[in-house]
Amino acid sequence: MGKFMDVHSGFVGVTGPQLREAHDRDLAIENEEGVHFAQAWLDPVAGKVFCLATGPSKAAVMRIHERAGHPTAEVYELTVEVA
């Protein structure tokens, strides 16, 4: 299982409840691709959303986001981690 961080643009002015709604759409279908979205962060001024997920592939993460209505091509596999 890989770990992935993705970045979405175009979320200027989005609120916390709106982010929750978008995240919930991912959670509702994530099992269909073997993906789990652990957390999402929002910078409403910059219009950026960042999502942390685990799953079998970058493509699987991208498919869930596309199906949930907020596609992104900016998905990064996190292969090196320090604590």
Image (spheres, rainbow, N blue to C red):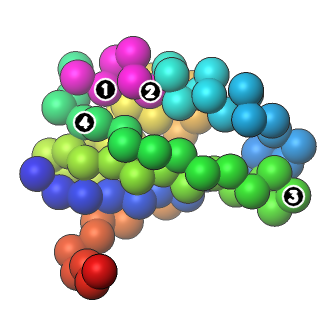
Q: Which residue sits at x=53%, y=46%?
A: 40
Q: Is disc 1 surrounded by few (<14), some (14 to 19) or many (20+) residues within 10 Å?
A: many
Query: Where is mark 2, residue-wise?
Result: 26
Sequence order check, earlier mark of 4 and 3: 4
Element type where label 2 sits in the image = helix
Q: CA distance from mark 4 to mark 3?
A: 28 Å
Q: Taking 79 as reference, is 71 left or right?
A: right
Q: Which amino acid type is shown beneath numbered disc 4?
A: Val
Query: Where is mark 3, residue-wise?
Result: 45
Sequence order check, earlier mark of 3 and 2: 2
Rendered view: 81 above or below 69: below
Tally of marks: 4
Report x, y in % for residue 32: 22, 20
Q: Which amino acid type is shown beneath numbered disc 2?
A: Asp
Q: Main structural element of the magenta stretch: helix, strand or loop?
A: helix
Q: Quadrant of residue 55?
A: top left
Magenta span covers which residues?
A: 26-31
